[in-house]
Amino acid sequence: MSSPHASPRPRPLSSRRLLPPGLLFALPFLVLFAVFLLWPLGEGLWMALTDKALSAHAPSFVGLDNFSEAFGDAEMWRALWHTVLFTLISTVPLVVVALGMALLVHTGLPGQWVWRLAFFAPYLLPVGVVGLLWLWLYQPDLGVYNHLLGAVGLDQVAWLSDESVALWAIALTTLWWTVGFNFLLYLAALQSIPDHLYEAAAIDGAGAWRRLFSITLPQLGRITTVITVLQLLASLKVFDQVYLLTKGGPNNSTRPVVEYIYDVGFTGYRLGYASAISYIFFALVLLASAAQFAVLRRREK
């Protein structure tokens, strides 16, 4: 007969938990995160410290030479300015127009499904289709826009070959193509506003404009913050539509920094230098995002 004070038998090794349950659930994500994000980030940073090129010779370590060259590169700063300018002229319309579209649909226009489809459908198009469509619209002689201008007696516009117009034309294309996503976010936010707020305002005799500025817009403050941040990040990374419409022209007047990185790396074959520019741009985007979040948090408080 065993003693009542005998120590308990050890559990079999197979029943012991070698890893915490939470870590087991997170392990697939952590593996993918390390393989597809951390490892490329580390590899790119190492490449930025070398003179790696698209050639057979082995890269050699150059330290911070690529970064110092980039800070003195006038073309890089010019491309960065084009990126910032495009972000400024595209973000505001993409927020304001999306809000207006959502308000129109939310008010109960007849045939709402048609309006929703028309507003959101362009966002589903591949960038190649969008580029070909707007290249045709912007054609100097056969394009629809110049045809309409000629019909009302106005001069034709060189939409994609005039340095003062090309970036605005790309911003207009981007507005038509991507505003549907912001519209959908605003529409979902409008539908989540409690009805009793509008009922109380109606009892107090508030008109439509009063309800808009006192109830609707304040209730949309958080989603406006989210949309603005997302749109700023998307505009800073602009590349596809610029490359398809102008390839950075005319005279590199529309070339964004992402296209400049592409040109340096895959046309000039300087992968190390392109990586250094990429990390400089990445740092600037992080600083801009942090500053924006700080401002928005201060406003909310």
Image: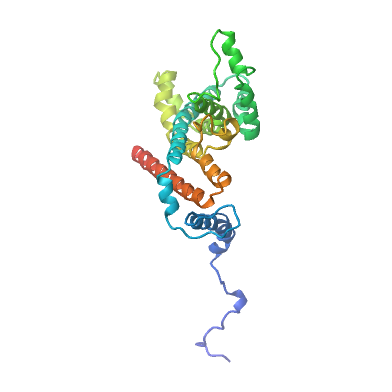
Q: How is the image coloured?
A: rainbow
Q: Residue furthest bottom?
A: 1
Q: How far from the left and from the top, in percent, is residue 47?
A: 51, 56
Q: Quadrant of residue 263?
A: top right
Picture residue at 43% right of the left edge, 53% below the top: 65
Q: Is residue 113 visible?
A: no
Q: Is residue 21 left or right of residue 206?
A: right
**Quadrant that contains the C terminus:** top left
Q: Is residue 105 left or right of residue 206?
A: right
Q: How far from the left and from the top, in percent, is residue 30?
A: 55, 59
Q: How far from the left and from the top, in percent, is residue 145?
A: 59, 17
The answer to whether residue 125 is above or below residue 28 is: above
Q: Residue furthest top?
A: 153
Q: Quadrant of residue 115?
A: top right
Nearer to the camera, 63 or 217: 63
Nearer to the camera, 155 or 188: 155
Picture residue at 53% right of the left edge, 40% below the top: 259
Q: Is residue 234 left or right of residue 214?
A: right
**Quadrant that contains the N terminus:** bottom right
Picture residue at 39% right of the left edge, 26% below the top: 214
Nearer to the camera, 40 or 207: 40
Nearer to the camera, 197 or 123: 123
Q: How far from the left and from the top, in percent, is residue 152?
A: 56, 8
The answer to whether residue 51 is above or below residue 202 is: below
Picture residue at 64% right of the left edge, 34% below the top: 128
